[in-house]
Amino acid sequence: MELRVNRRALVGLGLVGALTASSFTLLKADPGTASSHREAPAIAGDPRNDNTDLYAFVSPDKADTVTLLANFIPFEEPNGGPNFYQFDTNSRYNIKIDSDGDALPNIVYQWTFRDEDRRGTDTFLYANGPVTSLGDENLLFRQRYTLRRITSGGVRTLVENGVVAPSNVGPASMPDYATLRAQSIKDLPGGGKAFAGQSDETFFADLRVFDLLYGGDLSEVGQDTFKGYNVHSLALQVPKDEVALKGDATRNPVIGVWSTVDKWSPKGYVQVSRLGQPLVNEVVLPAGLKDAFNSLSPSKDADVPAVVKRVTDPELPRLLEAVYGLKAPKTPRQDLVEIFLTGVAKANGPIKADLNSQILNKDAVRLRPSEMLRLNMAIAPSATPNRLGVLAGDLQGFPNGRRLGDDVIDIAVQAMAGAAQTGKLVDALATGDKVNGNDKPFGTRFPYIPLPGNTSVNAG
């Protein structure tokens, strides 16, 4: 099968064909390579390195900056003591930026961690009294981190010896957690900010989608599977020019973003997690490709026919037809190629707006199809955000980057059913999973993600 891409959006693909023996060799899974909400077999046993969600958006209160945020450790039960949750000190956590469209990172922001554990053999407690500051002696376990910015020009340390906001043990141990969060935010050289620590789980969805697509009759909807859980977050707010090609966000407003985790092994650091757009590994790729996909660089995506075919001929529309009788759109799905691999460009489909095609970057010289989260930083934050993003006419929403409030489950199902192809929503799926927002409001300032909860998920 040939994958044809409009030349306005992309230069030179033609890499799709039948699945060959060499493809199986390339896709052979290495132990421990996976990512997202437990959707890949290997990562299910390694939650500290499980990248659950990635967000990229123009900062709503500081429109000359962009905010990048990656979450880890799915389903953190707030009362999960006595050790609670922490980042892996044997791993490197990365947010990577492609500013010229060649699917290789031009900029890497990299976090590494070390533990300060003062519990010794005397106590099992995480905190042995009220913790009123990050330096409080009552806090018996804390993590520190180093944040580096890596480019072809070298490595620059942005934060050294930063303190991770601790797990929210409860009101007796941490009576004012908001203060601990505020103290953990670090100012960066050049006007940016950084945060590392526990947060509320902001992904909202009814995961009974995996029970034959909401029970086979849309009866299993309206239950936010993630309500009450926490995650660990890494967040950056940086000036747009800092991540734009040649430092010029006016000429080159489009960036591609993905996150990875490299874990130490006897062979050295091995990539065990990769995340760009939400739900790609969970819904687009079959079980046999999940681990292998997460060991790949985006620059390799177009070389793997099995991966590209899952975009041009996806499984979910066929399931919607089999379960609900919704006619699957004709293949190959050029609309999904734009969403997942190349970025959406004016006149390339029913969405008549330049959103995130790398062709917008005036100084870009190479373009390569690849799966990542693309953001056009020139599109200003919306005064009235719509949870359905671009499909509802809100061009600042997903798939133009991803905001905390974007309803990616409903957007993805609509897109798979053909909404991006026809330019209108599929009426039969209009109600979606009936989980339309997070249970906690988002903040108005960096890092925007809500504070972590301290009430047990099964509290009633």
Image: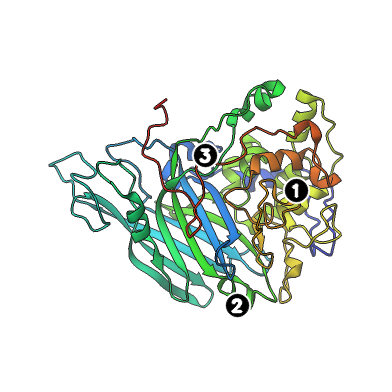
Spatial CA distance of label 2 from label 3 is: 38 Å
Determine whether, in the image, residue 140 is placed left or right of residue 159: left
Q: Which mark is residue 247?
A: 2
Q: Nearer the viewer, mark 2 or mark 1?
A: 1
* Quadrant holding the C terminus: top left
Q: Residues within 10 Å of mark 1 (few under 14, many from 20)?
A: some
Residue 243: x %, y % from top left = 58, 70
Residue 121: x %, y % from top left = 14, 42
Q: Secondary structure at mark 1?
A: helix
Residue at (70% x, 43% y) in the render: 411
Mark sitting earlier along the chain (2/1): 2
Does residue 331 sit above or below 249 in this rendering? above
Q: Secondary structure at mark 3?
A: loop
Mark sitting earlier along the chain (1/3): 1
The amino acid at mark 3 is Asp
Residue 431: x %, y % from top left = 71, 33
Does residue 163 sit above or below 126 in this rendering? below
Residue at (52% x, 37% y) in the render: 38
Q: Which residue is mark 3?
A: 439
Residue at (71% x, 73% y) in the render: 364
Q: Secondary structure at mark 2?
A: helix
Report if the CB atoms under discs 1 and 3 are less than 8 Å apart.
Answer: no
Q: Which residue is mark 1?
A: 392
Q: How is the image coloured?
A: rainbow
Residue at (58% x, 69% y) in the render: 106
Compare residues 137 and 342 and report the one nearer the observer.
Answer: 137
Compare residues 232 and 439 and report the one nearer the observer.
Answer: 439
